[in-house]
Image (cartoon, grey):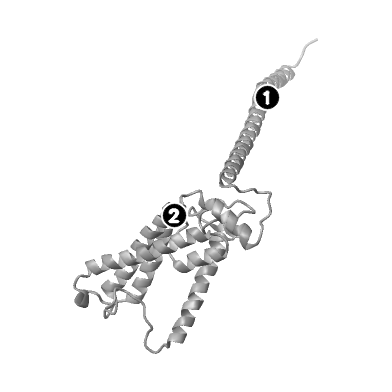
Amino acid sequence: MTSHPLLLAAACLAAAALAASADSCRAEEPIEDAALLQSSAAARSRGEHNDDVLSTATKVQELLDKVIEKEMALEGGNPAAPATDGPQSGNATAAATDEAVPALHQSFAEFVAMTLFVIVGCGSACGIANKEGSAWVLQVALTFGFAITVLAYSIGAYSGGQINCAVTFGLVLAGQLSVTQGLLNLAAQLAGSVVGALVLRAVYANHAKDDQTGGLGCNGVGEGFSKGSALLGEIVGTFVLMYVVLETAVNPMSVANRTGLSRPWPSGSRCSSPTRC
């Protein structure tokens, strides 16, 4: 039986095409298998990475919990104990917490801070008050503000950075500071004020010429104001100051808003000063 040459050629071409298709399929199978292996390996790698991240986060959380528990144990705080009200319980807790830093260390910190506060704040007023063309009121106000902030951060770990007799008295009334420590801090603050004024007196030796305030930056009743209105202004200003201290540095509900100035507040406990618990 003879075959036509064209049929033979077509048959050969068809056979060659089928062979090439089979070869390409066999060549693609390893590639597909390799891709599948690669994708599965990547998936496993991602899963292991996620597991590692979760494991690390869990370990960090456990470590933080242990640190907080140890801190509360050192400070005598109990997270499960409810807060107790009443002046006796508050004073007892304040007295116990005061022992964390020796009483004299706390009062000495207040002495140093008050001395520097008077030198910086009142000194700025002595140098620029009543000068024409200067925004001296704004400058002096900012100087006092920055000074109290820096000093509070500097001595906050020792005494809480009260640097104000009214704040100390308010903390004693609130049961956050023992009466003994309050009296020591008061004496230290008054002594610091005197020492700061003496330093300014030495700096401005030519008192009448150099001191722009005429009284080392002492406050007085301004023109147009009566003593009663000045007293009312002092009462309102002191209330605002004490209210801010109690709500921002003493209230346990504000612990999340605090900065590095204060330690974590043990839930259900009281502190002996606004920034030290």
Residue appearing at x 61%, y 48% in the figure: 77
Residue appearing at x 57%, y 64% in the figure: 174
- Mark 1 closeness class: few <14, some 14–19, many ≥20 residues within 10 Å: few
Residue appearing at x 46%, y 62% in the figure: 183
Residue 252, given in percent of the width and then of the height, sits at 60, 58
**Amino acid carrying mark 2 in the image:** Gln
In the rendered structure, find residue 209 and report the number of the disc placed on it.
none
Q: Which is nearer the eye, 236 or 185?
A: 185
**Amino acid carrying mark 1 in the image:** Asp
**Distance between mark 2 and mark 1 Cα atoms:** 73 Å
The reply, left or right, for residue 113 in relation to residue 94 is left
Q: State whether residue 124 appears in this view.
A: yes
Dividing the image into 4 quarters, which one contains the N terminus? Answer: top right
Q: Residue at the front extreme?
A: 180
Residue 40, given in percent of the width and then of the height, sits at 67, 29
Which residue is disc 2 drawn over?
106
Which residue is disc 1 drawn over?
33
Quarter of the image where one finds residue 208? bottom left
Quarter of the image where one finds residue 39? top right
Kind of element beneath mark 2: helix
